[in-house]
Image: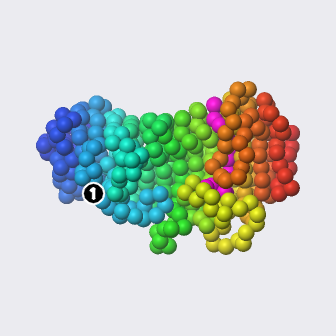
């Protein structure tokens, strides 16, 4: 890439006054370079090696923000440097701090390079713990209602909350990104496409304090005008480490999730591998999901589908009741979900936990060519977050409320008790 100052389409932020000294607030200078570039019809805003302390930066149409090797954006620790905007956060539109890098209703935008974006999130994590925040924390990179979005090559660390969060975007490519957040940092998910279409996530390494990759589509509290499915998603060639879930769908899924392919990934020490979660009242349909060619090492539970997810609703009988309730618009539905060619070793709590609603069983689920080895040394714990479920250790598959489930060439070794714990609520075919 040529970055000579003689090229009008490349704007070096140093020439707009950015110091790169790690102490001076450089966001005004960088934003000025973005605006000047946009006025010329677009181009590249270039950050050479240096440490750039910034608050929120807002891209414009046809802008590439390029961080060269040795360039680091440092997120300001002053909340005043992140203006309050109205944006979707955790499933509904509300006032939040603007992301470190963001933009709305844009096209042809990119954040590229071999540089680092450090959100310096510790001050935000502490404020979350102390409940002193007036508004939700900023995300590291989040674009809303944008098309033709590319994120590539960067390293993202210490995000204040979710790290990469496209919302209502179309044609999104996320390639070769490394995301590292501390294991104890709250809600620092890695990559969360939310009500997006045509998303490709590939060749990424994610190790975070919450779910690594999560597909979302809003909650029942979202305004109907903002409801839309998350669909046509591919996730491939990624290593996912230490998160609460490797690849997760939900629990914000009221807009629906469909047409998702997950393949050729390695999960290392995640609490759960493939995790699908929702509850009564949330509504939405998750359908046509294909998962294949995975290796999991040291996960608590490789496969979970939980329609009694209780976070934020613990003790609510409408959520936790295991008896059938009436089916309505708030009843979530999971169907046509298929897993194949997966190896899981050193599994802790259970080989699988699949729990549909009594009034809306899981439908058309298959697992084929699966090899699971349960750890000989494992503490007991809960494979999923739901009221009134048993603590488990070294268990096989626990399946309730499912119809047309097919288990073909699924091998479970090292478990204590049954390999497949199914009751009369399950309509299954098991082929050794």
Name the side, left or right, on which 432 lies relative to 313: right
Q: In this view, does 197 lie to the left or right of 157?
A: right
Does 196 sit above or below residue 74?
Answer: below
Question: Is 21 part of what is drawn in magenta?
Answer: no
Q: Position of residue 385 (x, y in %)?
A: 63, 49
Give me the residue at 39% from left, 44% from top: 125
Residue 18: quarter of image: top left
**Residue 242 higher or lower than 309, as above or below:** above
In terms of depth relative to the viewer, which is nearer, 321 or 91? 321
Residue 332 shows in this picture = no
Q: Nearer the viewer, residue 189 or 174?
A: 189
Colour convention: rainbow
* SS for dot 1: loop
265, 252: nearer the viewer: 252
Q: Name the residue under label 1.
A: 83
Rendered position, 395 above or below 43: above
- Residue shown at 33% from the left, 42% from the top: 123
Q: Quadrant of residue 153?
A: top left
Give the image location of residue 352, x and y in percent.
Answer: 72, 43
Q: How many marks?
A: 1
Picture residue at 59% right of the left edge, 33% below the top = 269
Placement of the C terminus among the 4 image quadrants:
top right
The residue sitting at 76% across, 63% down in the picture is 323
Question: As drawn, is 123 to the left or to the right of 194?
Answer: left
What span is in magenta? Answer: 297-310
Report whether residue 96 is seen: yes
Q: Residues within 10 Å of mark 1 (few under 14, many from 20)?
A: some
Q: Where is residue 61 in the image (x, y as percent from the top left)?
A: 30, 58
- Quadrant location, the N terminus: top left
- Residue 197 position within the rendered picture, expressed as x and y whole percent measured from the top left: 50, 59
Q: Which of 290 and 285 is in front in this view?
A: 285
């Amino acid at each position: 890439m040529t970055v000579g100052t003689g090229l009008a389409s490349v704007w070096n932020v140093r020439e707009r006054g950015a110091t790169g000294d790690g102490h001076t607030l450089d966001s005004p200078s960088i934003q000025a370079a973005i605006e000047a570039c946009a006025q010329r019809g677009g181009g590249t805003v270039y950050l050479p090696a240096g440490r750039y302390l910034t608050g929120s930066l807002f891209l414009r149409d046809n802008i590439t923000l390029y961080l060269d090797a040795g360039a680091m954006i440092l997120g300001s620790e002053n909340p005043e440097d992140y203006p309050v905007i109205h944006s979707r956060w955790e499933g509904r539109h509300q006032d939040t701090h603007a992301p470190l890098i963001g933009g709305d209703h844009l096209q042809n935008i990119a954040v590229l390079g071999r540089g680092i974006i450090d959100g310096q999130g510790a001050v935000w994590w502490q404020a979350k713990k102390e409940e002193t925040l007036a508004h939700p924390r900023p995300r590291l990179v989040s674009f809303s209602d944008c098309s033709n979005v590319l994120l590539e090559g960067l390293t993202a660390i210490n995000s204040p909350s979710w790290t990469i969060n496209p919302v209502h975007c179309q044609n999104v490519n996320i390639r070769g990104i490394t995301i590292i957040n501390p294991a104890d940092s709250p809600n620092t998910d890695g990559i969360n496409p939310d009500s997006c279409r045509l998303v490709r996530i590939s060749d990424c390494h994610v190790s975070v304090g919450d779910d690594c990759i999560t597909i979302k589509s809003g909650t029942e509290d979202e305004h109907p005008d903002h409801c839309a499915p998350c669909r046509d998603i591919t996730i491939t060639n990624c290593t996912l480490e230490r998160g609460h879930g490797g690849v997760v769908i939900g629990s914000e899924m009221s807009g629906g999730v469909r047409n998702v392919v997950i393949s050729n990934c390695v999960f290392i020490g995640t609490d759960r591998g493939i995790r699908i979660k929702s509850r009564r009242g949330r509504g939405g349909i998750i359908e046509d999901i294909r998962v294949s060619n995975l290796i999991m090492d040291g996960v608590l539970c490789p496969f979970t589908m939980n329609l009694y997810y209780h976070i934020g609703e613990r003790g609510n009988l409408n959520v936790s009741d295991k008896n059938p309730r009436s089916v309505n618009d708030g009843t979530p539905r999971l169907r046509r979900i298929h897993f194949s060619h997966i190896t899981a070793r050193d599994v802790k709590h259970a080989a699988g936990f699949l729990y549909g609603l009594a009034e809306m069983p899981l439908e058309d689920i298959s697992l084929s060519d699966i090899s699971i080895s349960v750890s000989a040394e494992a503490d007991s714990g809960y494979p999923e977050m739901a009221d009134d479920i048993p603590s488990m250790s070294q268990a096989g598959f626990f399946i309730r409320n499912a119809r047309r489930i097919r288990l073909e060439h699924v091998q479970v070794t090292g478990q204590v008790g049954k390999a497949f714990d199914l009751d009369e609520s399950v309509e299954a075919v098991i082929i050794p």
